[in-house]
Image: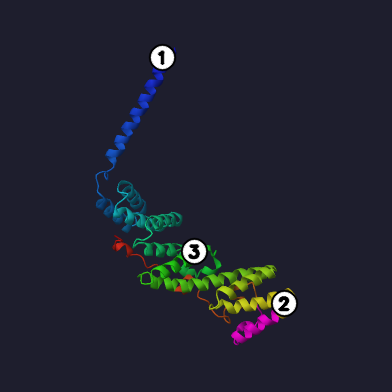
Amino acid sequence: MFLSNFHLASRSILLLILIIIIASCASTSDDKTQNWNADKLYGEAKSELEIGNYEKALSLYQKLETRYPFGAYAQQAQIETAYTHWKNGDSASAIASLNRYKKLYPNQTGIAYALYLQGLINFNDKKTLFSNITGEDMAERDAVAGKAAFQSFKQLVTLYPNSKYTPDALKRMRFLINVLAENEIHVARFYLRKGAYIASVNRCKTVLERFQETPAIEEALAIMVIAYKKLNLSELSSNSSRVLVKNFPNSPYISNVYNPKIKGGLPINIRKQTETTWKESGIFEKIKNLFTEKFF
């Protein structure tokens, strides 16, 4: 009985191994890329990317990196994989690919582009096809992505001041400074509305300390006047008012009642506009043709 069971088990194992071998052979024979060299794999992946067949492109880039891991093509494939992930709507995988690229090739010419692309991915975080039309305000989004984008662009312009990506990165940085300052004001306005006056003042102080050259300074001072008054800190309220009048003598916040329930605290017809929406930024994706060049 024991021998019978043993032989049965042995036959089952052999059959399973045979099935695996057959499946493996079939899989290999079905893979038309098995004899492609690096140049062929790269060319086909690039073609799939250009026509928007992102899943196919990613598959080919992966095969290229796996079969030719130490070649220049693998280096190029890795950075293009990041771009393809982004175009395919997977920002997390795109960022992961870029971090891996920067770690493996810290001194390569593609680093400038990697930093630029990383900034773009975070800059466009949560942007939709209708963002420009609806006038979506970037300052009202979570500031984490904006801060990450700013840091990537800052690293780019610092390390590669002569890069062809630097001029656009500088424009985006200037825009992002306003966005980040307005984000602090957006939160300060929320706290003021909820009666969290100390938290509101702290957000305004952040604007005064970190974003001194932005238009948000004006509203920050106006909020501080109100918040300090609500906290019965009359002297601090008066000081904030004095600074507001001295620096912005024609400010609409001086002669109008501030309303924390509306953007800017004042009706749109009397307050200054801040350039923090997608439409106002005038900045669009400019990387459609970047992969016509190679980084090796």
Pointer 2 residue: 229
Residue 246 colored magenta?
A: yes
Instruction: Calculate the distance from the C-alpha at mark 3 to the C-alpha at mark 2.
Output: 35 Å
Decide if residue 236 is on the left or right side of residue 33.
Answer: right
Question: Disc 1 on helix, strand or loop?
Answer: helix
Tag count? 3
The residue drawn where x is 70% and y is 78% is 236
Bin the neighbour count of mark 3 within 10 Å (Cα to Cα): few under 14, some 14-19, many 20 and up: some
Bin the neighbour count of mark 1 within 10 Å (Cα to Cα): few under 14, some 14-19, many 20 and up: few
Question: Disc 2 on helix, strand or loop?
Answer: helix
Residue 242 colored magenta?
A: yes
Tell which residue pokes out farthest to the top in this image.
1
Amino acid residing under circle 3: Ala
Pointer 1 residue: 4
The residue drawn where x is 33% and y is 64% is 290
Asked whether residue 282 appears in the rendered view, the answer is no
Report the span colored magenta: 236-258
Instruction: Calculate the distance from the C-alpha at mark 1 to the C-alpha at mark 2.
Output: 92 Å
